[in-house]
Structure formats: C-alpha cells, structure tokens
Image (tube, rainbow, N blue to C red):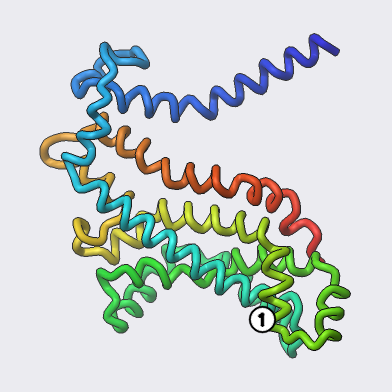
Amino acid sequence: MRARSVISHVLLAGVALAFLYPLIFAVATALKPPGETFGSASLMGSSLRWRNFSDVFAYVPFQRYILNGVLVAGAGTVVVLCASALSAYAFASLRWRGRDGVFLLFLATLMVPQEVLVVPMFLLMQALGWVDTYQSLIFPWAFTAFGTFLLRQFFRSVPGELREAARIDSAGELRIFVRIMLPLARPALGVLAVFTFITYWNSFLWPLIMINDVTARGTVPLGLQLFFGQNGNQWHLVMAASIISILPTLLLLVALQKHLVKGIATAGLAGR
C-alpha cells in the first residue's frame, strides 16, 4: 500500500508538472534578456531581467487595456448574472404554457458557433450606432443559454416546499427570488461569474471586429497584438504582458474559490 501511494503521488506530480510547464516556460521567457528568448535551449536566461515587466507599460499603454478589460469583463459578468438568474428562475419555478419547448429552443442556441453570428451581430451594432463603444463589447454576448441552464439546474434542486411555504406567507415571486433563491444560489452564481469573467477577458475576435480605436477602448488580447509589428516580435514582452494579464483572473479565482468548489460540486447535478 505504501509503494502504491508513492507511485500515485509521483504520477500525480508528473501530471501537475506537465500542466504547469507552459506557465513556467512563460515566466522564464518573461525574465530573459531580449536577445536570449530563442537563442538558447536553456529554460533560464543569463540573467533575470525584471524590468521586462515595467517595459511592457512603456512599450504600449498596457494599463489602459487592463482597465478596459476589467470594465468590460466586470460589467458583462454583472449583466450575465442578472439576466441568467431571472430567466433561470422563470424556467425552473414558474409554470407557463410552452415553458419546456421555449427552454429547448433556448438551449439549441448553444450549438450555433460565435463565428456564424458575427456578421448579423455587427450589422445590429452598426444600426444601433454602437460600433467602437464599450456597450458593443458587453451586451451582444450577455444573454446566452449557458448561464441560464446552469442556474436553472440549481434552482430545480431547491425543494419546492420552500417556495410554497413562502407563498403561504404572502411572499410574491420577486421576493422569493431575491430573499430565498439568490442566497441559496451563491455557489452556482460564483461558478458562472468566474466562467463569464474569463470568457469576456479572453475574448479576441469580437473586440477585434468592433473596436477601431484600440488605444482608447482596446482590451488585453488586442493589446497583446501590439507587441508584434514592423520592429519585430517582442517575445519577452509578450510573455511578461501575458503573465500580467493572468493576475486579474487569478485574483478572482482566489476570491471565489470557496463558492467555485462548492458550486462545481452541487450545481447542475441535482436538477430534474
């Protein structure tokens, strides 16, 4: 049993190292001098060049892209949580004609790839006058079926007797939703918040199409593209900027770790 435990730990450590190696390589490359990025087979350079991280902000206004990314991802996450929670409660707890059929049609939208919707969505944004604006980055993808499905499954796992007892006490549906269902759904909301924030934060195709003034309203993925240009590819700065761009999502994961673990363990498993 002891030998089996040692072997298991060694295998797990090997798998963990395999997953961590790209991050280790990125950090090591970010600390290399400019001329040693690909000039040596060694993982580490001849010296640790910490100023690469400050050079990122001198090369491009990367702090602006981070603020734009936090604004877009944060606002988009709030909109997704509100819209998904309301629609999920309607599909899970309210009884109305055609509810299940509408929900199946709603889920069918998950099978439509984003690339198919880019052209009609761009024409809609152009008709609204939202091209090259923050709202064009936030609202078009805020009303998707994934969050509704996730929260619906969680709401259906809540005993119906709890809602019936609240109705007997003269509580309306809005009060039941705000005072009872939302507090119970914190783990599922935490999972959805993390997934949504990361999706907005890493989005590249839609901001590339919608944003004309990258300096003013560009997000982090668009900012990373500026390190590739006529003066060559600044790989050491790209890696340093990539490490910096990980920090907001890492802080979010740490802040919501408890809800994330609990939500993954419960959300979507007990729905009927």
Quarter of the rendering containing residue 58? top left
- Mark 1 lies on a secondary structure that is helix
Whole-percent x, y for residue 264 in the image: 69, 50
Q: Is residue 182 above or below residue 267?
A: below
| Vertical comparison of 241 with 217: above or below | above
Instruction: Give percent across and percent down for residue 177.
Output: 69, 76
- Disc 1 marks a residue whose amino acid type is Val
Q: Nearer the viewer, residue 58 or 150?
A: 58
**Residue found at the very far top of the displayed protein:** 3
Instruction: Report the residue marked by disc 1.
Output: 102
In the figure, residue 230 lies in which quadrant?
A: top left
Residue sitting at 32 percent across and 68 percent down? Answer: 134
Q: Percent from the top left, x then y, of residue 49?
A: 25, 21
Query: Along the line of sight, which residue is nearer the eye, 97 or 104?
Result: 97
On-image quarter of the N terminus: top right
Residue furthest out toward the front: 169
Q: Is residue 230 above or below residue 144?
A: above
At 26% from the left and 57% from the top, the residue drawn is 218
